[in-house]
Image: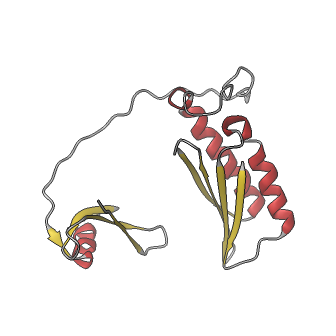
Amino acid sequence: MKVTITGRQMNVWSEMEATIEKKLAKLDKYFGDNCSATATLSSKKNEKCIEITIRTTDGTIFRSEVRDETFRTALDRCIYAIERQIRKNKTRLAKKLREGAFDKGIFDTGEDFEEEAEFVIRKKSFTIKPMSVEEAIMQMNLLDHEFFVFLDDKTSEVSIVYKRKSGDYGLIETTK
């Protein structure tokens, strides 16, 4: 697995890089060598944050973001969260991940995981109208939603505004 480690507004010390690479190497049993992992570390006040994103060759993305008092505990919780995602979805992932990833013995953690049933999808349809980004944010806030889909009045493309954890807003623009 190719690992990229970056620090947001901070330098990542070599000992931490080695620890992250060692912990991510444990996930090679699921992915093999043909995937890439990105670990991003940040620190705000007394809160340490690690975000790990793993991209497989077939386009599947595993992501976990954990905030904790120390980077080491955040890293452990982050790795655990990704392993949990894999275990919970192992039936759907069995064809996509490395052959032998789910051989007997790998999941002897003492935990019992129920495999999830098929997805429950709630369908909703609505008419999208052209509006500015500012108007879309206002509509999203009025509806008290986390995101809002709209037709951008400048580009005539479908766009999405969303609330970020930091309290800011994000914009996703689509292209044809």
- Looking at the rendered structure, the number of numbered marks drawn on it comes to 0
Is there any visible trace of residue 101 in the rendered image?
yes
Q: Nearer the viewer, residue 154 or 163?
A: 154
The image shows residue 140, relative to residue 37, as above or below, that is below
Q: Residue at x 53, y 26 (%)?
A: 91
Please state, as top left, top right, bottom left or bottom right, where the C terminus lies in the image.
bottom left
Comparing 61 with 36, the one in front is 36
Can residue 145 be seen at all in this image of the molecule?
no
Q: Quadrant of residue 121?
A: top left
Q: Position of residue 40 (x, y in %)?
A: 66, 65
Image side of residue 66 versus residue 89, left or right: right
Q: Is residue 133 above or below residue 73?
A: below
Residue 90 in which image quadrant: top right
Q: Is residue 165 left or right of residue 143?
A: right
Q: Residue at x 40, y 28 (%)?
A: 118
Percent position of residue 11, x then y? 76, 76
Q: Which residue is rendered at x = 69% and y = 25% of the image?
A: 100
Location of residue 12 in the rendering, given as x and y in whole percent from the top left corner: 77, 71
**In the orientation shown, which residue stands out farthest toward the top?**
104
Residue 3 lies, with reference to residue 122, above or below; the image says below
The residue at 71%/43% (across/down) is 33
The quarter holding residue 161 reads bottom left
Q: Which residue lies most toward the right here?
A: 15
Residue furthest to the front: 176
Image spot of residue 172 (x, y percent): 36, 66
